[in-house]
Image: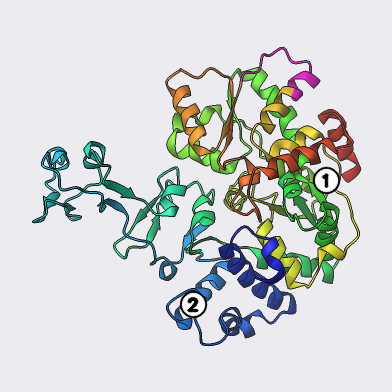
Amino acid sequence: MEHTIRKFDTKVQHLKYKVLREVARFAWEGTLLDNIINIPNMIVPGKTPTMRCCVYKERAIVGERIKLAMGGNPANPNIIEVIDIACDECPAAGYEVTDSCRGCLAHRCEDVCKRGALSFDHNHVAHIDKSKCVECGACAKVCPYSAIVNRKRPCQNACKVKAISINEENAASIDNNNCIQCGACVYQCPFGAIMDKSFILDAIRLVKESENNTKYKVYAIAAPSISSQFTYAKLGQVITGIKELGFFTVLEAALGADMVAMQESRELAEKGFLTSSCCPAFVRYIKTSYPQLVPFISHNLSPVATLAKYLKESDPTAKIVFIGPCTAKKAEIQLDTVKDYIDVVLTFEELQALFDSRDIDITTLEEDVMDNASYYGRIFARSGGLSDAVAQGIKEQNLDFELKPVPCDGIEACRLALIKKVKNLLDGNFIEGMACVGGCIGGAGCLTHGEKNKSEVDKYGKEALEKTMTDAISMLDMLK
């Protein structure tokens, strides 16, 4: 993987990046349509397969990756898509009898199976008839040897909302009605058979058009989790690199986080109970699984949408590209409440591809800075940060309200808090929902994941010049 090994967690991410890089490179040159057919051969050169049974299948899969890099299937509203031909290496999912079966006489597994799916061979070893099995798991629970296991695919294990099943072709299938588009399956699939659609071509088009006329400027808004990414360079060099790509300037989404924290703390004090609105995957989860709690969702837009709205109201010619860790943001900007404010969403993976498509080595660049948000706006990037910011908002505005936050680190923690609220058992008045474990620093579009990312975000927050959210928000007038 040459020098790029330090940029990504996995080889799957690197493969995805290579396709994005080449698509972007030809798009900058204006020759993409002329070179689409050549990209698979560039990614998979020679005649020796490195990942699949043959180079022809490898190239066919790269062809599907190119389609996703160019926006994916427009008929599929989901940001997340399955590459069927790449999803054929995982074993069949479901309950299976392992070689730990001792052929015991009790046959408890047979007794509890209401479908008659258990049978035994001449050695008394159990076998499961898949045509009868309904995957209830009763047999596994009673086996004294734990010889019956539930083999779930990595994507199914990653999807905590149970939106992934296995179809008749033995490939993953996503239920768009339940999917919250968090991208956990994208990051966890060992074969890269599940990917998020990319809108990198839209970003390139905006930048190129802005360079050729003066009708508008393209603003980049960077998520605060950017401070934990691009670990091989300095954050100031990343900011310079974004401007080198052709963006007019780079702003902190953390400024929008400061605005949201102040507004959300007031709304909470007025209503007495809220669930946060910052994580689009969490908001979608409430709407799909706990619709009775929809009235409690904060009416505030997410931080980036709040800042983008402010920018476009100040400068109607502005074009906004959000750069962050989140695949669900790509779905958020399609909402009627947001689509007028944010034009394109890119992940950190896609930003890395953009840098290298223009041969920009950010390690050689001078350091620049973003507009300064407060410590509290910047720590939105990790779990618990929003709760701390709302507490600060209550303090700065002298609100008479006792905050009892329930920070939820990952969608499973969110589910538990929401169930407790439905049953009137929740000891708290503000649910901070983060679909990704760790918060935004655990997003599927991150280059790297890990506990160190949290310390990097906190360190970045402490570097903020503005010590209060009020001071940070006052700086917004300078953007007009």
As for residue 157 lying within the magenta part, the answer is no
The stretch of residues the image draws in magenta is: 392-404
Q: Main secondary structure of the magenta part?
A: loop
Look at mark 1 in the image and give the residue it sits on: 314
Nearer the observer, 411 or 274: 411
Identify the image quadrant of residue 274.
top right
Q: Position of residue 366 (x, y in %)?
A: 91, 60
Q: Position of residue 458 (x, y in %)?
A: 76, 37
Badge 2 amino acid: Glu
Residue sitting farthest toward the top = 400
Residue 58's tag is: 2
Quick one: quadrant of the C terminus? top right
In the structure shown, which secondary structural element does the residue marked by tag 1 occupy?
Answer: helix
Residue 264 vertical placement versus 110 (above, below): above
Identify the image quadrant of residue 267.
top right
Which residue sits at x=45%, y=33%? 291
Residue 135 visible in the snapshot: yes
In the structure shown, which secondary structural element does the residue marked by tag 2 occupy?
Answer: helix
Q: Position of residue 216 (x, y in %)?
A: 82, 60
